Image (cartoon, rainbow, N blue to C red):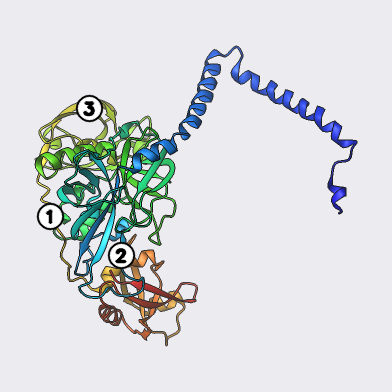
Amino acid sequence: MAESDRRPSRVTKPLLAPLAVLVTVIAIALLVPIFSGSDDARDETAYAAQTDFTADIGALSRFREVAAMATAAVVRIESESTAPMSPGDIPDLFEPFFGPGTPGEPMPEGMPRIAGGSGFIVSSDGRILTNAHVVLGGDLTVWLDDRRSFEAEVVGLDPTTDVAVLDIDASDLPVLPLGDSEEVHVGDWVMAIGSPGVGGGQLEQTVTAGIVSAMGRPLQLLSQELFADPETRDVAGYAIENFIQTDAVINPGNSGGPLLDLNGRVIGITTAIASTTGYYLGYGFAVPSNLVQGVVEDLVEYGEVRRGRLGVNVSTVVPEDAEFFGLDEVRGVLVQNAQEGGPAAEAGIQQGDVLLSIDGEPLESAGDLQQEIAERSPGDDVAIELLRNGERREVQVELEEVDLDIPTGPIEPDDADAVQRLGMTVGPLTPQIRSQLELENDIEGAIVLEVVPFSAAYRRGIAPGAVVLEVGGEPVDSPDQVADRLDDVGSGEVTSLLLRGADGNDRLVTIRVP
């Protein structure tokens, strides 16, 4: 069709104006009942919604103002060591930013290696907050927004919440105030700031924005890390994981930076991302500021966290629980076990009780209970409302102090083999497995039985059911040979795995041994 054929004719054009007017009149007529009419309550609700939305649009214009104010108080933290870092120094789960070094090449022995993340200043005399996993592993240097650098001292750190406090010898510094994370709601606009550049150079002060996607996410990231180390296994159950989830972009190097509301208040410390590649895929997580506040107060005053203990094993109420126990709504915390001799048991709390609130604060999940206890001190009395046999009752519990005894220095390498450090387990190709996978009898190798979430193998897309055919270009015929070949690969070095998937296709995967 010619261009002229697609244009409205002179006859058609004048008819569009009255039609547009008619449509507009109809639209206005349809909208009028929303904002005016006999239903006053409906009118007020609709008007409030409209004005709130207008206020939110106005708030978005503050992004530039908040960013300009906040970036001055965000710092880059570098941890330098001369020996290759052990697997435990910087947990894989938190996707740190490493340098120098070329991807795919091993780090030469004795060359300085830098890991790092972000932090932010909370007092003008040099107090800085960040993640615990950012500061483990070496000598610390803090780079300010004005490119000045300072040696940093660790005041204290708490791996059970992934919070650390640093001090630098400086004065008259810009600061960021901590906000109230209890006032944060799903859908709120937030801003994440990090300083991932190395040595006060490129990429410092990266600002991203998004909304709060969810509250109270129990990811089990910290508990997995603590449980993986024999020295911290006993305290893995005390990890507090009640994260704020956001879609604001968080990439490697942003760990420890602030998550801000539109008033420039810190509502969380960015901690982790959900990713299969090591880079942002849409989900970021932050430690809530109210939890941070209590941890920081303990670290500054005592050099360690003083944690209260309730003495229960619990789970979040699910629909089946709500139906069985006669709850009006699906919320609360189900007591699986009240530990004998513990504060809860002494106060009369029993297995099967549903905990509904603590000191009047409703409990939606097990994470809420963890955080409420963590925000209190040993010796505090708390009032717990619970449901038992369809009846509500209240009990008073005095929290007991628990000795966390958490090592806070660099973690020494363990003797785990390379297969374990990759985060997977392998087994033999039994006749049953060969039959299920329809493998020919002349195919040799080992079957991947399990892959740990967020491990090196997980991030490279290796899944249970894959068959390892080669390691480093050499064929393997058993799980032991896979382990032996991988053990010949040094920590930090890259090798290749030839895998046969469930679809029968072969895939070459390069992977770095942690």
Residue indicated by mark 2: 99
Q: Nearer the viewer, mark 1 or mark 2?
A: 2
The reply to whether residue 483 is visible in this rendering is yes
- Which kind of residue does numbered mark 2 sit on? Gly
Q: Position of residue 378 (x, y in %)?
A: 11, 36
Amino acid type assigned to the residue bearing label 3 in the image: Asp
Q: Position of residue 245 (x, y in %)?
A: 38, 44
As helix, strand or loop, the secondary structure at mark 3 comes to loop
Q: Is residue 122 above or below residue 102?
A: above
Residue highlighted by disc 3: 359
Q: Secondary structure at mark 2?
A: strand
Residue 343 pos. (x, y %)? 12, 36
Q: Which residue is mark 1?
A: 407
| Quarter placement of the C terminus | bottom left
Q: Amino acid at mark 1?
A: Pro
How far apart are the alpha carbons under marks 1 and 3?
A: 33 Å
Label 3 crowd bin: few (<14), some (14–19), many (20+), radius 10 Å = few
Quadrant showing the N terminus: bottom right
